[in-house]
């Protein structure tokens, strides 16, 4: 995954408006991410490319534990489409 992954980049573009923040309010990013994941339609969040984009944001940008997305999805009764080892071993270039 990286700049060449057009599908993931397209999904990131769809959700980027949720993360436009004023420099004085960076503490709310994690809360916004949780709210977005919990309110996203199931038909959208169950796509592998959406989950890959969200996983990237959670792990590499927000430095949250890798199991966070899976826990949020389980709370909603939705499946985690990604295989945990696949995500961890992937080079996020």
Image (cartoon, grey):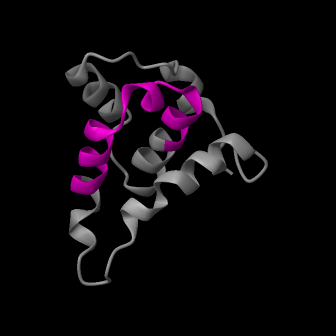
Q: Position of residue 36 (x, y in %)?
A: 31, 47
List x then y, in percent, for residue 44.
Answer: 47, 32
Question: Along the line of sight, which residue is nearer the eye, 50 or 55?
Answer: 50
Q: Is residue 33 magenta?
A: yes
Q: In this view, does 64 lie above or below 81?
A: below
- Residue 25 versus residue 91: which sits nearer the camera? 25
Side of 89 relative to 37 (left or right): right
The main secondary structure of the magenta stretch is helix
Q: Quadrant location of the N terminus? A: top right
Q: Is residue 22 left or right of residue 82?
A: left
* 45 sits to left or right of 4: left
Q: Is residue 47 visible?
A: yes
Question: Does the magenta run of residues contain 92?
Answer: no
Seen at 22% across and 64% down, the residue is: 28
Q: Which of 15 and 61 is in front in this view?
A: 15
Q: Residue at x 74, y 46 (%)?
A: 6
- Which picture quadrant has residue 73? top left
Work out whether residue 90 or residue 15 is closer to the camera in this orientation and state it.
Answer: 15
Q: Is residue 29 above or below residue 71?
A: below
Query: Which region is colored magenta?
Result: 31-53
Quadrant housing residue 87: top right
Q: Which residue is drawn at 69% across and 41% down?
A: 7
In the rendered image, residue 84, in percent from the top left (x then y), is placed at 48, 22
**Residue 92 makes an appearance in the image:** no
Residue 39, given in percent of the width and then of the height, sits at: 27, 39
Q: Which residue corresponds to the image point at 46% horizontal and 53% vertical from the top-left?
A: 15
- Report how many numbered discs are placed on residues in the image: 0
Q: Is residue 57 above or below residue 26?
A: above
Q: In which quarter of the image is residue 41?
A: top left
């Amino acid at each position: 995954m990286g700049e060449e992954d057009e599908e993931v980049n397209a999904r990131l573009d769809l959700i980027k408006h949720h993360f436009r923040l004023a420099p004085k309010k960076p503490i709310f990013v994690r809360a916004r991410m949780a709210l977005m994941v919990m309110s996203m339609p199931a038909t959208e969040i169950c796509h592998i490319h959406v989950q890959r984009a969200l996983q990237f944001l959670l792990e590499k940008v927000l430095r949250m534990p890798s199991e966070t997305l899976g826990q949020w999805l389980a709370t909603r009764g939705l499946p985690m489409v990604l295989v945990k080892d696949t995500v961890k071993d992937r080079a996020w270039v």
